[in-house]
């Protein structure tokens, strides 16, 4: 397990790399985007670290997600299936979305969701 200091260092490096490479949050505009994102439950969302603070959009929700594949539905971190369901709900409620990993540890991640401008 990583120490908090190590996790913050990893996130700082991700943020610096994202800024340098002009990485942007993933845009989900319609149901087909959700379908292609969750093929085989292999979710690929850009890890922007603290660069998420640079996003100019309205934050909707910060989702706590399991990244190990070992999570159970009754645990605090959303499983891939629960995450997919929540993204679909938010898409229906708010329209196009932006998603990015804001902070990640060895087994979970915080995924920030914004309303896409």
Image (spheres, helix red, strand yellow):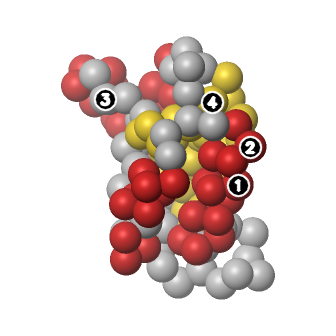
* Mark 1 vs 4: CB contact within 8 A: no
**Residue 83: horizontal and vertical position, in percent?**
61, 63
**Residue 94: horizontal and vertical position, in percent?**
70, 37
**Residue 38: horizontal and vertical position, in percent?**
43, 66
* Mark 2 vs 3: CB contact within 8 A: no
Q: Which residue is mark 4?
A: 115
Q: Residues within 10 Å of mark 2 (few under 14, many from 20)?
A: few
Distance CA(mark 3)–CA(mark 1): 25 Å
Q: Which residue is mark 1?
A: 89
| Figure check: 83 above or below 28 | below
Q: Secondary structure at mark 2?
A: helix
Query: How many tags in the picture?
Result: 4
| Figure check: 70 above or below 37 | below
**Residue 36: horizontal and vertical position, in percent?**
37, 60
Q: Quadrant of the rendered structure where residue 22 is?
A: top left
Say which residue appears at 68% left-offset and 48% top-offset. 92
Q: Is residue 103 visible?
A: no
Distance CA(mark 2)–CA(mark 1): 6 Å
Specify which label sits upstream in the sequence, 3 or 1. Answer: 3
Q: Which residue is mark 3?
A: 23
Q: Which residue is mark 2?
A: 93
Please tell me whether mark 3 or mark 1 is closer to you in this view: 1
Specify which label sits upstream in the sequence, 4 or 3. Answer: 3
Say which residue appears at 56% left-offset and 37% top-offset. 97
């Amino acid at each position: 397990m990583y120490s908090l200091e190590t996790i913050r260092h990893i996130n700082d490096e991700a943020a610096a790399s994202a800024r340098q490479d002009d990485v942007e949050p993933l845009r989900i505009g319609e149901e087909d985007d959700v379908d292609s994102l969750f093929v085989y439950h292999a979710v690929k969302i850009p890890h922007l670290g603290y660069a998420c603070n640079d996003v100019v959009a309205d934050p909707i929700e910060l989702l706590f997600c399991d990244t190990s594949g070992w999570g159970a539905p009754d645990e605090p971190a959303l499983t891939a299936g629960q995450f997919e369901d929540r993204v679909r709900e938010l898409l229906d409620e708010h329209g196009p979305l932006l998603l990015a990993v804001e902070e990640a540890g060895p087994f979970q991640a915080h995924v920030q969701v914004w309303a896409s401008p």
